[in-house]
Amino acid sequence: MSTREREARSLDANDPLPTLREEFLIPSAPGGDHEECAYFAGNSLGLQPRATAARVAEELQDWAEYGVEGHTDARRPWVSYHELLREPAARLVGALPHEVVAMNTLTVNLHLMMASFYRPSGARTRIVIEDTAFPSDSYAVASQAVHHGLDPAAAVVRLRPRDGEENLRTEDVVAFLEREGDTVALLMLGGVNYLTGQLMDMETLTKAGHAAGAVVGWDLAHAAGNVPLRLHDWDVDFAAWCTYKYLNSGPGAVAGCFVHERHVGNPEIPRLSGWWGTDPAVRFRMDPEIAHPASADAWALSNPPILSLAPVLVSLEIFDRVGMDALRAKSLRLTGYLADRFAEIGTIEVLTPPDPAARGTQLSVRVADARATVTRLAREHGVIADAREPDVIRFAPVPLYCTFHDCHRAAEALAAVTA
Ligand SMILES: *Cc1c(COP(=O)(O)O)cnc(C)c1O
């Protein structure tokens, strides 16, 4: 064992938050020798908790046993199943329980939120996103502009970093809002950027957006389960997040949505509605008039997919047990260690901000050919990372199941394949 490897083993053995790796199913490294891979793609698809399969099986059993009566008689009655997720989800994102709801998938929730909160009028028509927004967000905002009869080329503003820089500066976004804020209807950025891993100053930018008279929504796909959030206190108008990345709830799992308390009971806000958005006390009267509850549930449409909610519940129980603050502290240690090891390689350019307060778990590095490099990392070293064409590789040392030893493997592997 090299000195470096011994050091990584010792960091694992002495960390104040021992790894919960044994609670997850770790894929084998490609190549068939059954060695566990070093998994850094949890920002794309989190790993499966061992408890998930049994929980899904319970719902299948209850369906087999009760049929339609399972809505009320299952061990976790389906009619109110999503209520089980409310409090842990609220704790995860710093919300009041009635400000959150588990429903749909992320892009769907962004659209539902924009249907309510993107209300262009007069000169105030623009939606502000970041130039490195995830494509689904770009498509969603452009189509919302079209939906209002606007030209997306004019209605969508894409904020770019300064020349020669990789990340947006908070002061530049604030200056933009001071300068042009009276044309902005909606500011909707990623809380953590999917490409660079930059953690935005959500509190400051929410304030600046409001000072400019805009609505402020956050896409938390890469922030939920990655960094501590205080959506209520930050006065965020709305937010949405998926649960299959840091929240380990499985491919296409049910997403989360936040609507601030000051909006939830407001009858003036137009909503796209369905029967799951009516008051549960009167839902089964089958009235043609909707009676929205004063909660984020007013935006729910359909009865939720129980088989996809079960893994989210398991995941939220894990986050509740460990605590987001402890996970963030460990994530700072792991990511800091990985950043130091990447710096030692010398030739590796890291796009992610060097300031730990301005990043989450992920480090993004620039290489000549991302796809080929990621393939070699996997095949030759059992290190699973994620390529974004043409030249970015993302590594997320997820604190629940990644170890310092995994980071050691990643650094050694990256040095070898880029030598
Ligand atoms: C992962 C991700 C998505 C994916 O959207 P789905 O609707 O869940 O398929 C959207 N936006 C961002 C910023 C993402 O990181």
Image (cartoon, rainbow, N blue to C red):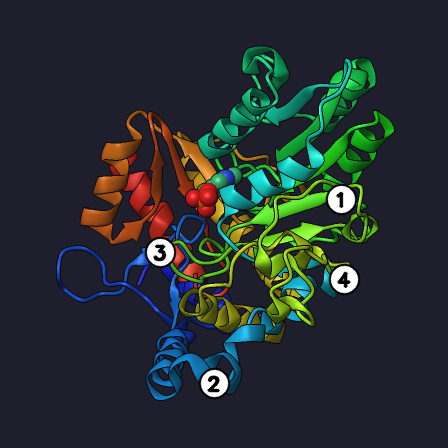
The residue tagged with tag 4: helix, strand or loop? Answer: loop
Q: Of tags 4 and 3, which is closer to the observer?
A: 4
Q: Residues within 10 Å of mark 1 (few under 14, many from 20)?
A: many
Disc 2 to disc 4: CB gap under 8 Å? no
Question: Does label 4 or label 3 sit earlier along the sequence?
Answer: 3
The residue that disc 3 covers is 39
For disc 4, does the CB lie below 8 Å from ligand 1? no
Amino acid on which disc 4 is placed: Leu
- Say left or right for 217 vs 370: right
Disc 3 to disc 2: CB gap under 8 Å? no
Q: Decide which of 391, 252 is in the foreground and name it.
A: 252
Q: CA distance from mark 4 to mark 1?
A: 12 Å
Q: CA distance from mark 3 to mark 1?
A: 33 Å
Q: CA distance from mark 3 to mark 2?
A: 36 Å
Is residue 32 something that shows in the picture?
Answer: yes
Q: Position of residue 394 (x, y in %)?
A: 41, 40
Question: Does label 4 or label 1 sit earlier along the sequence?
Answer: 4
Q: Of tags 2 and 4, which is closer to the observer?
A: 2
The residue that disc 4 covers is 96
Q: Position of residue 161 (x, y in %)?
A: 61, 20
